[in-house]
Image (tube, rainbow, N blue to C red):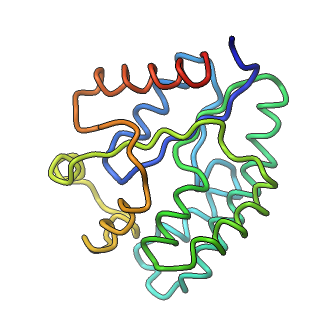
Amino acid sequence: METTSCYIAFEGAEGCGKSTHAARLAAELGAVITRETGGTAIGARIRAILHDTSVTDLADRAEALLTAADRAQHLQELVRPALAAGRHVVSDRTVYSTLAYQGYGRGLDVDELRHINGWAIDGLWPHLVLLLEVDPSVQAGRMHGRELDRFERESDDFHERVRDGHWVVVDASAGIDEVYAAIRAAIRDRLGI
């Protein structure tokens, strides 16, 4: 039985294929495609600060609050209206990135982050979260030659802590079509779409 409108999120480390698979799924479902941070005009301005490699002194708590501010705007302006109109929403990252990056990565209290972000999203958590895990050597190959942003330049220890904050749903080390087939099977099984 098909749900009227679903909010589906992709999570995982850099280079795991989130953006590729989110775009492919959104196209197949005729869904609204978006991302966090930066899914709105205001969010794009917040994202510019968060990902700017020249920003070297941003306090960890300020970083967490900026992501929560982006999220509050994103859900109010884009996600809620799309769902209310009966459209599916597919997002490249959501609140779970804050729990992983600012919680596990930066070492901020995960329960406090969950509380702050629960307030920011006014209780609208994704209906389904697909966490893509990729072998670090595959990830490194996918990231090679790219100009890295502020988060992507973090240490291996930081990224290992972020990975520990995620749980595995799909092995994203395989080929693109194989990974997408696993994603579609999970969505059909859990949401009926």
The one nearer the camera, 70 or 189, is 189
Q: Given the current orientation, which residue lies at the most extreme top position? A: 1
**Looking at the image, residue 177 lies above or below residue 16:** above
| Residue 1 percent across, percent down from the top left | 69, 11
Q: Is residue 182 left or right of residue 45?
A: left
Residue at the spot 72% in from the left edge and 50% down from the top edge: 74
Residue at 59% in and 17% down? 29
Q: Using the rendered view, name the quadrant where residue 96 is placed.
A: bottom right
180 and 114: which is toward the camera: 114
Residue 111: image location, x then y, percent: 63, 71
Please provide percent x and percent y for residue 167: 42, 50
Quarter of the picture holding the C terminus = top right
In the displayed structure, 132 sits above or below 85; it is below
**Residue at the image position 69 percent from the left and 57 percent from the top:** 71
Q: Is residue 174 above or below residue 111?
A: above
User: Would you say 48 lies left or right of 66 here?
Assistant: left
Instruction: Examine the rendered structure and indicate whether residue 167 appears above or below residue 159.
Output: above
Q: Residue at x 61, y 23 (%)?
A: 191
Q: Is residue 133 left or right of residue 165?
A: left
